[in-house]
Image (spheres, rainbow, N blue to C red):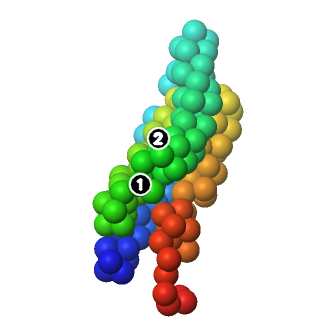
Amino acid sequence: MNKLIEKTLKSLKIEFLTVWILTILLVILNETDILPVGIIADNPRMDFILQTIGILLVFTFIPLSLRLFNQSLIKRIKLLSTEKAIISYRRWSEIRLSLLFVAAILNLSFYYLTMNTTGLFCGLMALLSTFFCIPTRKRMLKELDIIKNEEK
Protein backbone atom coordinates (compact mmCIF):
# COMPACT_ATOMS: atom_id res chain seq x y z
CA MET A 1 0.00 0.00 0.00
CA ASN A 2 2.86 2.41 0.78
CA LYS A 3 4.14 1.78 -2.74
CA LEU A 4 0.79 2.80 -4.21
CA ILE A 5 0.66 5.91 -2.03
CA GLU A 6 4.17 6.95 -3.05
CA LYS A 7 3.46 6.29 -6.72
CA THR A 8 0.26 8.33 -6.56
CA LEU A 9 1.97 11.19 -4.75
CA LYS A 10 4.82 11.23 -7.25
CA SER A 11 2.37 11.38 -10.16
CA LEU A 12 0.33 14.14 -8.55
CA LYS A 13 3.44 16.20 -7.81
CA ILE A 14 4.61 15.85 -11.41
CA GLU A 15 1.18 16.92 -12.65
CA PHE A 16 1.15 19.89 -10.28
CA LEU A 17 4.59 21.01 -11.48
CA THR A 18 3.55 20.49 -15.10
CA VAL A 19 0.63 22.88 -14.65
CA TRP A 20 2.95 25.58 -13.37
CA ILE A 21 5.64 24.91 -15.99
CA LEU A 22 3.14 25.08 -18.86
CA THR A 23 1.68 28.29 -17.49
CA ILE A 24 5.10 29.88 -17.12
CA LEU A 25 5.97 28.69 -20.63
CA LEU A 26 2.85 30.41 -21.99
CA VAL A 27 3.84 33.66 -20.27
CA ILE A 28 7.42 33.43 -21.58
CA LEU A 29 6.23 32.73 -25.14
CA ASN A 30 3.93 35.75 -25.03
CA GLU A 31 6.38 38.08 -23.33
CA THR A 32 9.09 37.29 -25.89
CA ASP A 33 6.63 37.87 -28.77
CA ILE A 34 6.88 34.31 -30.02
CA LEU A 35 3.11 34.10 -29.69
CA PRO A 36 1.04 37.07 -30.90
CA VAL A 37 0.13 39.70 -28.32
CA GLY A 38 -2.78 42.14 -28.46
CA ILE A 39 -4.25 41.00 -31.77
CA ILE A 40 -7.82 41.44 -30.49
CA ALA A 41 -7.13 44.62 -28.50
CA ASP A 42 -8.87 46.82 -31.08
CA ASN A 43 -12.05 44.74 -31.24
CA PRO A 44 -14.24 45.75 -28.26
CA ARG A 45 -16.97 43.20 -28.99
CA MET A 46 -14.54 40.25 -29.02
CA ASP A 47 -12.76 41.69 -25.98
CA PHE A 48 -16.06 41.74 -24.08
CA ILE A 49 -16.94 38.19 -25.14
CA LEU A 50 -13.55 36.78 -24.14
CA GLN A 51 -13.52 38.59 -20.80
CA THR A 52 -17.04 37.39 -20.03
CA ILE A 53 -16.08 33.81 -20.88
CA GLY A 54 -12.95 34.10 -18.73
CA ILE A 55 -14.81 35.50 -15.73
CA LEU A 56 -17.51 32.83 -15.99
CA LEU A 57 -14.87 30.11 -16.24
CA VAL A 58 -13.05 31.29 -13.13
CA PHE A 59 -16.16 31.85 -11.05
CA THR A 60 -17.47 28.44 -12.09
CA PHE A 61 -14.32 26.31 -12.10
CA ILE A 62 -12.69 27.46 -8.86
CA PRO A 63 -15.65 26.70 -6.55
CA LEU A 64 -16.57 23.64 -8.62
CA SER A 65 -13.10 22.14 -8.44
CA LEU A 66 -12.69 22.71 -4.73
CA ARG A 67 -16.25 21.80 -3.72
CA LEU A 68 -16.60 18.90 -6.15
CA PHE A 69 -13.45 17.30 -4.79
CA ASN A 70 -14.66 17.71 -1.22
CA GLN A 71 -18.08 16.23 -1.99
CA SER A 72 -16.68 13.27 -3.93
CA LEU A 73 -14.17 12.67 -1.16
CA ILE A 74 -16.79 12.65 1.56
CA LYS A 75 -19.49 10.70 -0.27
CA ARG A 76 -17.62 8.21 -2.40
CA ILE A 77 -13.91 7.84 -1.88
CA LYS A 78 -14.03 7.18 1.86
CA LEU A 79 -16.47 4.32 1.28
CA LEU A 80 -14.09 2.44 -1.02
CA SER A 81 -11.37 0.02 -0.08
CA THR A 82 -8.01 1.69 0.55
CA GLU A 83 -6.46 0.81 -2.81
CA LYS A 84 -9.53 1.89 -4.77
CA ALA A 85 -9.77 5.02 -2.64
CA ILE A 86 -6.20 6.00 -3.51
CA ILE A 87 -6.88 5.48 -7.22
CA SER A 88 -10.08 7.50 -7.01
CA TYR A 89 -8.30 10.19 -5.00
CA ARG A 90 -5.76 10.53 -7.79
CA ARG A 91 -8.46 10.77 -10.45
CA TRP A 92 -10.38 13.47 -8.56
CA SER A 93 -7.16 15.37 -7.84
CA GLU A 94 -6.36 15.34 -11.54
CA ILE A 95 -9.86 16.56 -12.43
CA ARG A 96 -9.61 19.36 -9.88
CA LEU A 97 -6.19 20.46 -11.10
CA SER A 98 -7.30 20.24 -14.74
CA LEU A 99 -10.27 22.53 -14.14
CA LEU A 100 -8.02 25.14 -12.55
CA PHE A 101 -5.42 24.74 -15.30
CA VAL A 102 -7.99 25.30 -18.04
CA ALA A 103 -9.29 28.43 -16.33
CA ALA A 104 -5.76 29.77 -15.82
CA ILE A 105 -4.46 29.07 -19.33
CA LEU A 106 -7.54 30.41 -21.07
CA ASN A 107 -7.63 33.58 -19.01
CA LEU A 108 -3.93 34.24 -19.49
CA SER A 109 -4.38 33.63 -23.23
CA PHE A 110 -7.33 36.05 -23.24
CA TYR A 111 -5.16 38.60 -21.45
CA TYR A 112 -2.42 38.37 -24.07
CA LEU A 113 -4.93 38.47 -26.93
CA THR A 114 -6.82 41.50 -25.63
CA MET A 115 -4.31 43.13 -23.26
CA ASN A 116 -7.21 43.59 -20.83
CA THR A 117 -6.10 43.01 -17.23
CA THR A 118 -9.32 41.21 -16.34
CA GLY A 119 -7.90 38.06 -17.97
CA LEU A 120 -4.67 38.48 -16.04
CA PHE A 121 -6.45 38.78 -12.69
CA CYS A 122 -8.74 35.83 -13.41
CA GLY A 123 -5.80 33.71 -14.55
CA LEU A 124 -3.88 34.55 -11.40
CA MET A 125 -6.90 33.65 -9.26
CA ALA A 126 -7.07 30.23 -10.90
CA LEU A 127 -3.33 29.72 -10.48
CA LEU A 128 -3.42 30.72 -6.84
CA SER A 129 -6.25 28.25 -6.31
CA THR A 130 -3.90 25.46 -7.36
CA PHE A 131 -2.11 25.95 -4.04
CA PHE A 132 -5.12 24.24 -2.46
CA CYS A 133 -4.19 21.21 -4.57
CA ILE A 134 -0.56 20.77 -3.53
CA PRO A 135 -0.13 17.01 -3.12
CA THR A 136 1.50 15.96 0.14
CA ARG A 137 1.56 12.65 1.93
CA LYS A 138 0.11 14.18 5.09
CA ARG A 139 -2.81 15.73 3.23
CA MET A 140 -3.54 12.56 1.30
CA LEU A 141 -3.53 10.36 4.39
CA LYS A 142 -5.67 12.85 6.28
CA GLU A 143 -8.23 13.23 3.51
CA LEU A 144 -8.49 9.49 2.99
CA ASP A 145 -8.56 8.72 6.72
CA ILE A 146 -5.69 6.28 6.35
CA ILE A 147 -4.08 5.53 9.67
CA LYS A 148 -0.35 5.54 9.27
CA ASN A 149 1.73 3.50 11.61
CA GLU A 150 5.00 5.20 11.02
CA GLU A 151 5.86 8.85 11.39
CA LYS A 152 7.32 10.42 8.26
Q: Indicate which label's residue lies in the foreground, 2 or 1.
A: 1
Circle 1: element type? helix
- Image coordinates of residue 34 in percent, x first then y, are 42, 45
- Near-viewer residue (38 or 131): 131
- Near-viewer residue (55 or 26): 55
Circle 2: element type? helix
Q: Mark 2 highlights which residue?
A: 99
Q: Residue at x 45, y 57 (%)?
A: 78
- Image coordinates of residue 23 in percent, x first then y, are 49, 51
Vertical side of 116 occupied by 45: above or below:
above
Image position of 149 (left or right of 62)? left
Mark 2, residues whose alpha carbon is within 10 Å: few (<14), some, or many (≥20)?
Answer: many
Q: Mark 1 highlights which residue?
A: 79
- Image coordinates of residue 63 in percent, x first then y, are 60, 37
The mark tally for this picture is 2
Q: Residue 116 carries which label?
A: none
Q: What residue type is labelled 2?
A: Leu
Residue 49 occupies quadrant:
top right
Q: Residue at x 60, y 58 (%)?
A: 131
Vertical side of 35 occupied by 141: above or below:
below
Residue 111 in view (yes/no):
no
Residue 140 in view (yes/no):
yes
Vertical side of 140 occupied by 25: above or below:
above
Q: Residue at x 50, y 57 (%)?
A: 20
Please tell me which of labels 2 and 1 falls first in the chain: 1
- Image coordinates of residue 92 in percent, x first then y, are 41, 50
